[in-house]
Image (tube, rainbow, N blue to C red):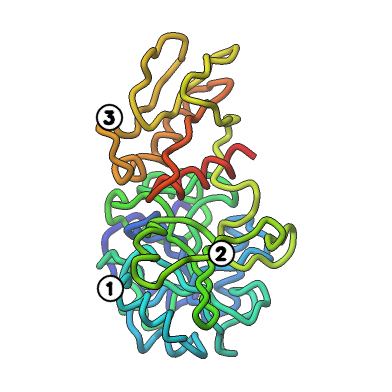
Amino acid sequence: MTAIVGTDVNAAAERLRAGGLVAFGTETVYGLGANALDPAAVARVFEAKERPSFDPLIVHVASWETVSTVVADVPPTAATLTDRFWPGPLTLVLPKREVVPDLVTAGLPSVAVRMPGHAAARSLIEAAGVPVAAPSANRFGRLSPTTAEAVVEQLGDRIDYVLDVGPCAVGVESTVLRVDGDEVLLLRPGGTAVEEIEAVVGPVRMLEESEHPVARAQPAPGMLPRHYAPRTPIVMAADDAEPPAGRCGLLTFLPPADASGWAAVEVLSPSGDLREAATRFFASIRSLDGLGLDTIVARPFPEEGLGRALNDRLKRAAT
């Protein structure tokens, strides 16, 4: 049975309360939500996505009252970050309360929490009356959806309802930080730029390669080496790289000097705006992925602002 696609927040909330799965739009990407305090409902998320249980979920909240039900302690630095960036595309990994099922956190003593910036997402959480565990609404490892149609394409026969809020405004997943006392550790770059965070709390430490677990409990979602991948093989190449053999598509931040030799070209921002590029990123890869190409060649972004998050997604897609 194909999921219902609609705009009825109360209908979607009723399904969440009943243990169902609801995909819903946020400012970042569409999430696949379940009652975060219902282990059976959370298990359905992993089943629908075919997601390994060592990859934790983000718990979405709509108020500070809800935060206090799932988080045991909020350090002052974390409170400073939430004052500045919530609601918005920032996730914080904080000590969890026992009420949060181990399946949500991959058995870790911490929980990833976010207050989404999209008003409809917060309205859904408020109407449901429960915190909502929600990874991106895609098959595990595949492209994150930024429209309701993209959700249905991947998960339409596995979930109950899709709350359609239109295209996502940010287009890339949230930034994930772990806060230990005064130390702020970047676990995943995303929709809130590191430069903005450092302007508020000072230097942010980057995760060392030796600290990155593989095939065991991940400290945050979206950290596995291969992720966000299309069906078509994707490779990263310099701006002046020639098209490889076969039918190849080009994904590029700025218009190429020479588009000849490419079977298709997706320009993410003719004006060089990283925010515009982020909103078009997953949809453009999805467009190239549907053309039956042999390869997608992706040119890297400037390593600043949202470019850092986009490069992270490209590297994982190309692994």
Indicate the amino acid at tag 2: Val
Q: Where's residue 80, x and y in %?
A: 36, 79
Q: Secondary structure at mark 3?
A: loop
Q: CA distance from mark 2 to mark 3?
A: 38 Å
Q: Secondary structure at mark 1?
A: helix
Q: Is residue 317 visible?
A: yes
Circle 2 residues within 10 Å: few <14, some 14–19, many ≥20 = many
Residue indicated by mark 3: 270
Q: Where's residue 283, x and y in %?
A: 39, 39
Residue indicated by mark 2: 45
**Which mark, by number, is residue 123?**
1
Circle 1 residues within 10 Å: few <14, some 14–19, many ≥20 = some
Residue at the spot x=42%, y=72% of the render?
114
Indicate the amino acid at tag 3: Pro
- Height in image: 181 above or below 133? below
Mark before the other along the chain sequence, 1 or 2? 2
Residue at the spot x=64%, y=74% of the render?
103
Circle 3 residues within 10 Å: few <14, some 14–19, many ≥20 = few
Q: Is residue 11 visible?
A: no
Q: Does the CB distance between marks 1 and 2 fall below 8 Å?
A: no
Q: Where's residue 55, x and y in %?
A: 63, 63
Q: Nearer the viewer, mark 1 or mark 3?
A: 3
